[in-house]
Amino acid sequence: MSELLSVEDLNAYYGESQILFDVSIDVGDNDVVGIFGRNGMGKTTLLDSIVNRIDRKTGRVVYDGEDISEWETHDIIREKIAYVPEDREIYPALTVRENLELAAPRTIDRSTREERLDYVFEKFERLGERESQRGGTLSGGEQQMLAIGRALVTDPDLLLLDEPTEGLAPTIIDDVIEILEELVTEDRAVLIVEQNITRMLPLIDRGYMIETGRIVADGDADYLDDEELQDEYLTV
Amino acid sequence: MMYHLPLLTSSEFATYLLNGISQGMIIFLVASGLTLIFGLIGLINFAHGALVALGGYGTLLIADATGSFWLGLFGAIALVALLGLVLERSVLHRVYERPLLGFLGTFGMYVVIEELISFQFGDQARQIASPLPGYVSFMGATYPKHRLLIIAIGFAVALGIGALLSYTRLGMEIHATATESETAEILGVDSARVYTLTFVIGAALAALAGGLTGPVTSVSPGMGMSYMILAFLVIIVGGMGSFKGSFLVSLIVGQITAFGWLFLQPTYVRLGVFVAAMVFILYKPRGFFGKPEVFE
Amino acid sequence: MSAVAELRRYFTETKRWLLVPVLLLAILPLVTEQYFLSIATQAIILGLFAISVDIALGYVGLFTLAPAAFFGIGAYSVAKLVVDYGSSYWLGFPAAIVLAVVIAVLIGYGPIKRRIGLVYFVLFTLAFGVLVHDFTYATTWLTGGSNGLGYLTAPTLFGIDLSRTVPYYYFALLAVVVVAGLLYWLLSSDYGDVLHATRQNEVRMRYLGYDTDREKLIAWVLSATVSSIAGALYVATVNVASPSLMAFSLTGEVTIWVVIGGLGTFFGPFLAAFGLTIFESYLGAVLPEGYLLILGALFIVFVFVLPDGLVGLLQRWRDGE
């Protein structure tokens, strides 16, 4: 299997405290991979380390054959890696359209950009209706859609999703899952971090369990669909 | 100290009004570069006053050598922008996370640049010849054309920068970086580049202010500093980082200084403006137009 | 333990080494000429001024751009009483202290209580500093305007004519040693520890039950008062209280001394102020316009390369790095 992304022996730190210990994961082309674990186990730190948004780390992050571990965040993003952060990070004072335009790469021409915006507005009709509304006025679910939309305008080869269903009402979660189902069938690799494993298992090819900064189990969706395993690493 | 309120003739009124507008524009031109840098980076760029003076001297020297004021002005803007680039890339970008060092560092630059100018050209004020000498008649008053030029360019700069911030990709990136630079990075925005560009634009605006106002205020090593303090106050009252705010408040301060003369000695008008600024810092630190989410 | 190490311990741990510079300063009049001594008088007073600014800037992190205002308030207090009211020179000192305390409380209470950030504090004190300077310039009836208030000299005390260079030098040295000694004693006590801890983590200190606003306000008032005392001591060396004693350039200079000496190191700022003032007088003969230029360049180097200042440099050297 050709690996699009491999994280090798990653140790990550916030200030003095170490968050990740010798973490290694692989994501192949068009692979849909899940990272599961309880709160505070280092899931977000793993994604932050991949895009180099962290104080200090050791180990390697190899993407498409290149070691990107020392690259600056924006340079990593420009290699068609899109990051949807846990708390959405929508710009409240910018409109929906401006939020999307900001995320569109500088290198694409205007018509391509408009095409991609249209694609997002088609996928998320609610965003289309609120095109010129400010980001801060959107509901939680709409903000999540906008965050995903911002990732899609880059037409990413690798999509990093941090807890896409967190903090959303159950009906909204259904909407988001529906969108994710579509996304994972498309021609790209996806790395999803979640606590909510039951909703994610149908979407993923493979997954890892993480606890206190260490990978403790990995396997395909069938293997992870195991009550004992989930009880040990996920049930609160 | 108190004067009688004289009855103004319409020509006197027009003169005061125009004086206020042109004075406001000068303050705005100085404040605009400061507010851009301050709004985005949170850096109190003390070197700004020295860059204003450099713009004045650059214009003077190049205009003397070439005989063209405009060549002098644009040459000075280009050179000062280049200096801004060098300063930002060499040292300043390293201290954005440490406002105290940033402030001290730019303060040192201010001292060095101002002293270099004074070393080279002496402390006495020098005059730049205006490209538009002479006067025009306006509502029965005669008024220097160059001051009208300052007003026109001031408005043009306000509109230009306003459009840059509101309608261009760079403007959007500046807003995004100022609001939350880490988020901008994960959207592919090179925040370091945005900082650099903004600093260079700010430096260019400083040079513009120095060169353009040279013919009416004359140039001296300390010329920038005298405006800097007013400009800082304008930024506070207008709201930190609010471009619209500094424009409006510059105009208001210009009118206060122009018409204030009727009632009080100029120094007392200045003192009043300072007291007002101190009250603002205490009770309304975001000014009239400051955006809370941007400058916590 | 070698004799040298023994000696070093003897001095560093007991602070007895402090006697050495004081003794050196005390024998200075025996080995130098009058002109140099009058410069040295100003230099030790400006050293005290630098220490006072270090209390606000280095010890509590209150970045003030108003030190010259308080320095000037001290100088004008003495000059006003002596020149305009013909009253005693000595009355000038309590006046300088009282006036500085009152004004410092009035100016500092709001910003400190409201916890305005660093940037706002800088701009607030900048506005105040310029305000005081412009006010002094404008109110000719009160302050003599641009001419200032003069001419005054120090009086005779116990039969010693303090208006002469050597006696005034010793008087200033005594005053500086006493005031700086009291300050040093205070800052070495628990209060100094509280200030340092407050600057490093104010929130934690509040959780621990300290009224950090009060501690900062006290430090601010202390700083302003000592600046004012320095100004009061200084005015007799120039014989005139003029607006230049509260000009922004003096604030700039003292800030530079404090940073070059080392923020929060007490002796560093004194040393830098003393040394650079002497340096200025020597340079003045050779290159009169070069002082501020060199000072500015030196300052930039310290800010970007050696932010710990001279004392930090010495410490690193001592620790063998």
Image (tube, grey):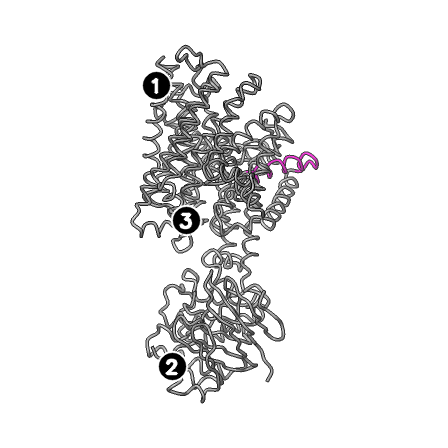
Indicate the chain on which mark 3 is placed: C
Q: Amino acid at mark 1?
A: Leu
Where are the magenta residues, as a range? Answer: B50-68
* Picture coordinates of residue A92, whole percent (x, y): 40, 62
Quadrant of the image containing the N terminus of chain A: bottom right
Residue that carries the numbered disc 3 in the rendered image = C200
Residue that carries the numbered disc 1 in the rendered image = C91
Give the quadrant of residue A59.
Answer: bottom right
User: Is residue C25 one of those drawn in magenta?
Assistant: no
Q: Amino acid at mark 3?
A: Gln
Give the quadrant of residue A162.
Answer: bottom left
Q: CA distance from mark 1 to mark 3?
A: 39 Å
Q: CA distance from mark 2 to mark 3?
A: 42 Å
- Ranked by sequence position, the earlier of labels 1 and 3 is 1
* Picture coordinates of residue B272, whole percent (x, y): 37, 33
SS at mark 1 in the image: helix
Main secondary structure type of the part rendered in magenta: helix
* Picture coordinates of residue C157, whole percent (x, y): 40, 13
Residue that carries the numbered disc 2 in the rendered image = A232
Which residue is nearer to you in this view: C53 or A16? A16
Which residue is nearer to you in this view: B13 or B257? B257
Q: Can the viewer see residue C163?
A: yes
User: Is residue B63 one of those drawn in magenta?
Assistant: yes
* Mark 1 vs mark 2: in front: 2
